[in-house]
Amino acid sequence: MDIIRNLGELALGSRLRRMSNTLMNETLAIYRYHQFDFEPRWFPTFYYLNEIYPQAVGVTDIAKVTRVSHPLINRFVTELKKAGYVEEVADEHDRRKRLIKLSYSGNELGQLLTPIWNEMELSIRDVICSVEPAMMKLLESLEDRFEEKGFLDTYMSRNKTRRYRAIEIRVNDPKFFEEFRKINLEWLEEYFGVEELDLKILDNPRKLIDEGGYIFSAILNDEVLGTCALMNLGDGAMELGKMGVYKKARGMQIGRKLLDVAIDKSREIGAKIIFLESNNRLKKALDLYRRAGFEFTAKSHTGESHYQRANVFMRLDLDENS
């Protein structure tokens, strides 16, 4: 049984590390066979310094070229210095800066290792070609893909999509009116304070619905975590408001799901435009609105704001975003 192989893609990192360890151990055996005191982990750093000899470069330059982390390059340089293969020299343009170059012994070693590296390259090519001649190109493509959008980015994207789909939105459900009130009081008290108009809406959500509006409740794992409302302004206009998510649930795609559903509902009922009023302190919310297509306007749709806290006004023209 080979659990790493059986796990397939899930154990790709472990499998590559296992293959790398095998290659490193066999490479070390080749160096020892030729009686060279040289460690395989030094190879990229040493090879680069050997290629540019007698030029000296900084650790940052080596890290950039080899695409190995700065701390690791520092470690390898320290080990190579201890072995006598590299030395530090002062930068002629800045005497405070230390550069790295091959020592005389390192240059001699590089000349001796070059034909061995050539033979190693041909040997590993024989192994690869016996299995898959195009493997190196596939490896390059995989590296490029990981740089463009790697495992972590892909995982986070899939996780966001999964969480988004798991959020259930309930519309105008009286069971959640109390949560509608609690959630909004939480963020209002956190940022601004509660105004009289807030209480009129939060204390009587039924009135908002009777006037053609909607209250949306976001539920995840049987718990209401976020809410928002659409107020009917008449003449095909709606106002988005009372958008709030419990602090413990922020960053879980709940605001985005609520906004998407509110926009879809507005289109469904034939609305032509959605207005909203906000505050420039709520940067994440404003970014969410902007990404959904809302545009900034100079003033409130009524000319004067409903709320003292409002200093940002936005609108979404649904005909242009259908």
Image: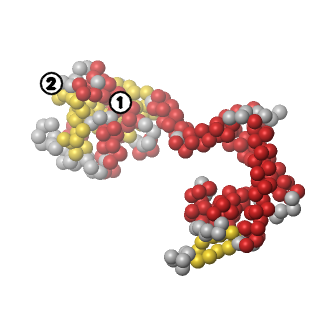
Q: Say whether residue 261 is left or right of residue 143.
A: left
Residue at point 82% right, 50% down? 26
Residue 260 image label: 1
Name the foreground residue: 238 vs 122: 122
Q: Is residue 186 above or below residue 204?
A: below
Q: Position of residue 49 (x, y in %)?
A: 66, 63
N-term mark: 1 or 2 = 2
Residue at (15, 37) in percent of width and height: 301
At a point 43% along the width and 27% down the height, the residue shown is 168
* 165 lies left or right of 295: right
Q: Where's residue 236, x and y in %?
A: 18, 24
State the quadrant of the N terminus: top right
Kind of residue sitting beneath label 2: Asp
The residue sitting at the left extreme is 303
Number of marks drawn: 2
Image quarter where the C terminus lies is top left
Residue matched to label 2: 235
- Residue at x 57%, y 62% (from the top left corner): 61
Q: Amino acid at mark 1?
A: Asp
Q: Is residue 221 visible?
A: no
Alpha carbon separation for disc pair 1 and 2? 22 Å
The answer to whether the residue labelled 1 contacts the one labelled 2, judged by CB atoms less than 8 Å apart, is no
In this view of the protein, which residue sits in the foreground, 268 or 213? 268
Q: Helix or strand or loop: what does disc 1 sit on?
A: helix
Relative to 190, residue 269 above or below: above
Residue farthest to the top, as pictured: 269
Give the x, y percent position of residue 161.
48, 32
The answer, for residue 13, to whether it is visible in the render is yes
